[in-house]
Amino acid sequence: MKKDLEQFVEEKAYIDTLFIPVIPVATSSDDKVVSSGFQLELNELFSRIIEEQFKGRIVLAPSFYYMDEKVEGEKDRLNEWIDAFSRQPFNHVFLFSFDRSWRKVEGELNGELLWFPGLRNGDLQSTETQSFVKEQAKEIIEIIKDSWKS
């Protein structure tokens, strides 16, 4: 992270996009705790792929964590998070989440929501999960590229 941020400071004239992983934390049941841990790992995997694909154009922000039942109440805190980062010269801000609850407040966010239905549980090393990650990462990459064109 430190090395990436040092690179950003040196090359910020060329880096115009911020990518923020938005990750739920669940505590209401054992199943949700395990599922949120898997979602965290899956989101981090996607974020690394996107960062590597667009190194020198995108900055990967620290993840934004929130309690999974409180999306409506967390919207303002997420916007404050975005605004704090936007003091840098970012023309594009992407929020990445597997939580469909964010779609309800999408129009009120100060960034573009990239929402994809994710796997609820699994093994990151499995063939199924790896295939899912590769296919969804391609979609995310195309969405980001299309956004830069407009």
Image: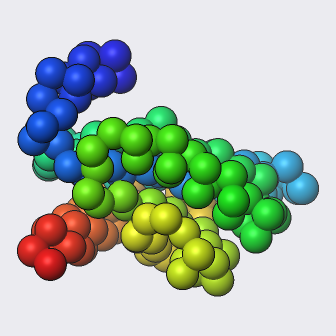
| Above or below: residue 7 compared with residue 33 | above
Above or below residue 5? Residue 94 is below
- Total numbered labels placed on residues in the image: 0
In the picture, which quadrant includes the C terminus? bottom left
Q: Is residue 108 above or below residue 31?
A: below
Q: Is residue 98 visible?
A: yes
> How was the colour assigned to the protein in this rendering?
rainbow
Location of residue 2 by image quarter:
top left
Seen at 29% across and 50% down, the residue is 90
Which image quarter holds the N terminus? top left
Residue 54 x %, y %? 14, 48
Q: Position of residue 148 (x, y in %)?
A: 15, 68
Is 135 on the left-hand or right-hand side of 123? Answer: left
Q: Is residue 30 left or right of residue 47?
A: right
The quadrant holding residue 76 is: bottom right
User: Where residue 11 sits in the image (x, y, percent)?
Assistant: 12, 29
Residue at horizontal 24 percent and vertical 18 percent from the top: 6
Closer-to-camera residue (33/75): 75
Figure check: 16 above or below 147:
above
Residue extending farthest to the right is 28
Q: Quadrant of residue 120?
A: bottom right
Residue in the picture at 50% in, 49% down: 83
Q: Nearer the viewer, residue 136 or 108?
A: 108
Q: Residue 149: x percent and y percent?
A: 9, 74
- Towards the viewer: 43 or 60: 60
- Identify the residue shown where x is 51% and y is 41%: 84
Regarding residue 125, the answer to whether it shows in the image is no
